[in-house]
Amino acid sequence: MAEAGLRLERAAPRPLAGEANAQAPVRPVVGEKIRIERGGRLLLSVEEIVVGRPGITAIMGPNGAGKTLLLRCLAGLKVPDSGLVSWAGLPPDRARALRLGFVFQKPVLLRRSALANLVYALKAAGLSGGEARRRAQAALEAARLADLARSPARLLSGGEQQRLALARALSLDPDILFLDEPTASLDPSSTAAIEAMVGKAAARGTACILISHDIGQARRLADEVIFMAEGHIAERAPASRFFDAPASPEARAYLGGEILVRDGSWNSEEGKR
Amino acid sequence: MQDFAEAFGEAFRLVASLDGNLAEIVVLSLQVSLAAVVAAAIVGLPLGAALAVARFPGRGAVIVVLNALMGLPPVVVGLSVYLILSRAGPLGVLDLLYTPTAMIIAQTVLVTPIIAALARQTVADLKVEYEDQLRVFGIGPWGAVTTLLWDARFSLATAMLAGFGRAIAEVGAVIIVGGNINHVTRVMTTTIALETSKGNLALALGLGIILVTIAIAVNVAVASMRGTAVRSAYG
């Protein structure tokens, strides 16, 4: 019976306006025994994950490995079928949501000017109008978007939009920043700009968790790598070690450019023939 | 057929000369319908947005009913408001029957479901896009409603114009609660009905021309607003 009660508690959605202080810590972000199933297929099964140390952690793995699902669970955007996510030991709550930033693969920008997008986020964090505008302007300058402050955000180019979304997330000075393939559809110079911004944020002490398919990007940025395959974490290692000598066969295959088939039998079967 | 051509000529003369009677009727029509749309928007926009954002038991049924109410027959609305405002009705003491206020109330009842249902659809579509980002910002349900309403402002203006088109063109509700009293509650549609039955086709036609012109103007406004929204990528 206690088990049933616990499950209910774990399945509860993100609570409404909590009493928790907006300045309360959120690190470390911990996921325990997280499972998500759809139609009998196991999409995510992670025994334990702890993130939040300053630096850049790259999450890598083939499509369908559960990278985005894991990120969404940790950020409190998705409630797993079972398992527990906690921020600094407490369940995710709305008051602390702003301590965690999230940059989506496709930037979600409000139908307002670039500046107003930042002001909105800063006001949500409780800043007064004047202070919000001052910080927004500074964040735009840091992202080299100051010239476009008055432009409608959704008229910007793809690269500018993603830089704006990242600048908006960083303007809140988050403790943890989740990035879901932020450069997936960007050209090299936009990608370089995003990478530079992420690198600076990490140097300031923000823990950045970055999903990337770009092995070069992960090599350039990451301090450590979490490699996922078929919904579980196959390997977690310092970046230098991971790229030189991946321990798991899945990671070896991925880095070697080999196709990883779901049941993992492809390589061995081919080898036998 | 000759009558008809003559009536057309007379109608254009009335419109061109800004006939006093005609102007009075047109102004009252615009006043009543604009007031009704403003009142309906004050109720309907937050209601529609709340229905798009909130999750509660019976929500699906409420949405079905709301969508069905978009097609409320004006005469039924007129009858209901009449029953409420008549001497024996619950609001009879206010003595509102056969006043422009009663007509505004009836048209508000008629238009509110239209604005609320269109607002719900618009806001629900936008919510799909914004939901995760608003959660990342820690925005609560009330903040989400205001954000979504503001960011959907161009589409919502279109919904309000649709409501205005419905209000200005209906006759059933205003004739029942207004009574089509000369110089008091006579509006374009009720005048057209009355003058046609009296055989005074010129005035009826003149009003018809103005009504059609207003309908076209509203549609031009909708189209240009959509163009502006697309150009500034707000759409």
Image (tube, coloured by chain):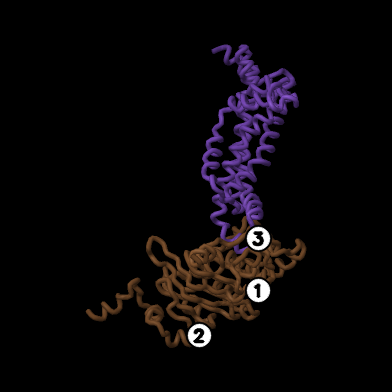
- The label shown at residue A17 is 3
Secondary element at image label 3: loop
Kindly indicate whether the residue at mark 2 contacts the one at mark 1 (C-beta within 8 angstroms).
no
Instruction: Please tell me how crowded label 2 is: few (under 14), some (14-19), or many (20+) other residues with Cα within 10 Å.
Output: few
Instruction: Please tell me how crowded label 1 is: few (under 14), some (14-19), or many (20+) other residues with Cα within 10 Å.
Output: some
x then y, percent, for residue A25: 65, 74
Kindly indicate whether the residue at mark 2 contacts the one at mark 3 (C-beta within 8 angstroms).
no
Q: Quadrant of residue B202?
A: top right
User: Residue, x 26% and y 78% (percent of image)?
Assistant: A270
> Mark 3 and mark 2: span between their CA atoms?
38 Å
The chain that hosts pointer 3 is: A
Ranked by sequence position, the earlier of labels 1 and 2 is 1
- The label shown at residue B31 is none
x then y, percent, for residue B119: 59, 44
Amino acid identity at mark 3: Ala
> Mark 1 and mark 3: span between their CA atoms?
16 Å
Ranked by sequence position, the earlier of labels 3 and 2 is 3
- Closer to us: B180 or A37: A37
Numbered disc in front, either 1 or 2 = 1
Outermost residue, right direction?
A130
